[in-house]
Amino acid sequence: MSTPAHLEVAKQVLRYLRGVKGDMIRWCARDVSSTHTVGQVYGYADASFADDSTNRKSTLAYFLFVNNAAFSWRSCLGSIVATTTEAELQAFAICAAEVLYARKLCMELGFTQLHATTIYEDNTGVYFACTAYALTK
């Protein structure tokens, strides 16, 4: 149900858009230095422990980049109540699943991924869990 207040806010938005219609946002990737190989996918994963105060679930997020540009990202509430490291591991696992999809997409588009995809994570527990898992395989 719309009210006069809703209509006034809509008018303000339209006036703002009319005023900035000619403005441009410009970003040039050539101006940004990157430590990553051109065309290689890399990502960042993180979790914020127990953000939701009612059910104690964590917020999970990841971002995937290629050539300094984010092309895939997600932020969501965790599906289970977890400790700090478990929440970080969930975020890492969700990011890793998206990396698999992104690598397959890159292959189909002709951008061969020559190296392993780096996922940056700020929790050492995730590093040790992944290392221990790799050693058992």
Image (cartoon, rainbow, N blue to C red):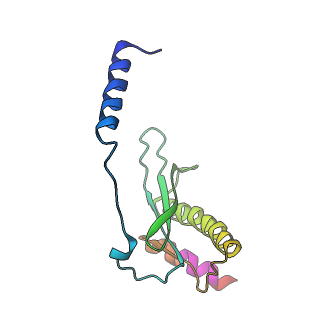
Q: Residue at x 56, y 65 (%)?
A: 95
Vertical relation: 47 (above or below) 7: below
Q: Nearer the viewer, residue 5 or 124?
A: 5
Q: Residue at x 63, y 65 (%)?
A: 97
Left or right of 116 on screen, residue 45: left
Q: Nearer the viewer, residue 95 or 28?
A: 28
Q: Residue at x 61, y 64 (%)?
A: 98
Image coordinates of residue 34 in percent, x first then y, are: 39, 79
Vertical relation: 14 (above or below) 20: above
Vertical relation: 5 (above or below) 54: above
Q: Which residues are magenta?
A: 129-134
Left or right of 110 on screen, residue 125: left
Q: Give the prevailing secondary structure in the magenta stretch.
A: helix
Left or right of 3 on screen, residue 135: right
- Quadrant, the C terminus: bottom right
Left or right of 49 on screen, residue 119: right
- Check residue 132 for magenta coloring: yes
Vertical relation: 53 (above or below) 98: above
Image coordinates of residue 108 in percent, x first then y, are: 71, 72
Quadrant of residue 10 within the rendered picture: top left
- Check residue 46 for magenta coloring: no
Quadrant of residue 107 within the rendered picture: bottom right
